Image: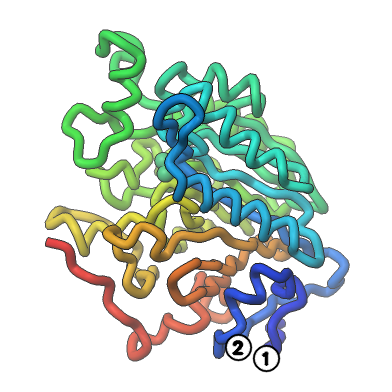
Amino acid sequence: MIKYDLSRRAFMKGAGAAAAVSTLPLSLVELAFADPAQNFTFGYISDSHIQHVKGAKFVRNWDRGLIRAVAETNLLRPRPDFVMFGGDLAQLGTKEELDHGAEMLSKLSHKLYCVMGEHDYYLDLGEYWSKLYGDHYYSFDHKGVHFVVLNSILTYDEWTFDRWPTAEQRMLEMAGLDNPNGSPFMVGEKQREWLAKDLETVDKATPLVVFSHSPIQKIYKGWNFWTEDAEEVQAILAPFARTSVIYGHVHQIQYNQIGNITFNSVMATAWPWPYPQSYAQAEHHLPKLTVPMNRADPFFERDATGWQFVDVGTGKVALEYNLYNNTNRRVAYNPVTGQPEDSAYQDPARQIAPQDHF
Ligand SMILES: [Fe+2]
Ligand SMILES: [Fe+2]
């Protein structure tokens, strides 16, 4: 059943969020459950890219993005049950950056879970990150939903262990876009075996939410909007009737539906990436379903960055995107069409093309 709620939703009454949505003429769609007590939300903050300059100096804008997201999250009522951080806390994976980011995240008044990003990983292969946040991949259950966190940014052993004279160079090579020395991301065989085993004991009707950093899809290889073993991971998830994959890394709104699996990206607090088709004249596979954000301009660094609420209950999630300098968006699963849809812009007549940059 779909309940049309013409007023802003209660959870958007947090002071910071209310300011951001006060002019929105949206009719919000709320998925209603047989037992509304089952509903819950969590906050999701991603891709803060905290960057050390020298001494006590860090790039201010990236700091401000994360500080604001944490402050707004703390104001949310009702409180999100927990907060997930979607990876790329640091820019170059140093202890200084991870400590500085962790200090800001420690101001959250919620339980925090973290996903590994490539910018957190490739300096010391996640060693210091582990001291702060524990396992690189894990699962947990919450109110009838099974949550899985994957480390999707691994790559070939030869690239990781043999190729580079220093760890710093390895990190820099993985940090760049359009870098011929880069290497595609993957979940890898060991973790896929773990995932299959983890899911063995989970009832196939249980809502499943999987967090990864890179998309468990193949969208654009040049920028690693790509996971090399996406199909193998999707096959492990396929038997579950209600599966959602939520990912960061792409710094833009993307959504898709493949079989039973819905895919939703989360935004960055640091900067937006343009859409591959608007920037690189190269083959790409942006999901046909995805309506690009209005004017995601990489030369306006705060444009279309943000954070989001995620509603869970049916196992198909709905994301409210709060975008600091852009139109807020809501992408929710529509049980009538069987796919995620943008509440305001899915209609082609209402879509605004992203800027071209070539
Ligand atoms: Fe990122
Ligand atoms: Fe990333």
Query: Image quadrant of residue 76?
Result: bottom right
Q: Quadrant of the C terminus?
A: bottom left
Q: Which mark is residue 58?
A: none
Q: Is residue 72 above or below residue 136?
A: below
Residue 128 spot, x, y in % from top left: 56, 19
Residue drawn at x 53%, y 33% is 116
Residue drawn at x 59%, y 33% is 195
Q: Is residue 126 above or below residue 26?
A: above
Left or right: residue 126 versus residue 201 is left
Residue drawn at x 23%, y 71% is 355
Residue 81 spot, x, y in % from top left: 78, 54
Residues packed near mark 1 inside 10 Å, few (<14), some (14 to 19) or many (20 plus): few
Q: Which residue matches tag 1?
A: 6
**Residue 71 visible in this rendered orientation of the protein:** yes
* Circle nearer the N terminus (1, 2): 1
**Residue 239 visible in this rendered orientation of the protein:** no
Quote the CA–CA distance across marks 1 and 2. 5 Å
Residue 125 spot, x, y in % from top left: 46, 19
Q: Amino acid at mark 1?
A: Leu
Left or right: residue 292 versus residue 235 is left
Q: Which residue matches tag 2?
A: 27
Q: Secondary structure at mark 2?
A: loop
Residue drawn at x 21%, y 64% is 278
Is 136 in front, or is 263?
136
Ligand 1 within 8 A of label 1's CB? no
Q: Is residue 163 above or below residue 233?
A: above
Q: Secondary structure at mark 1?
A: loop
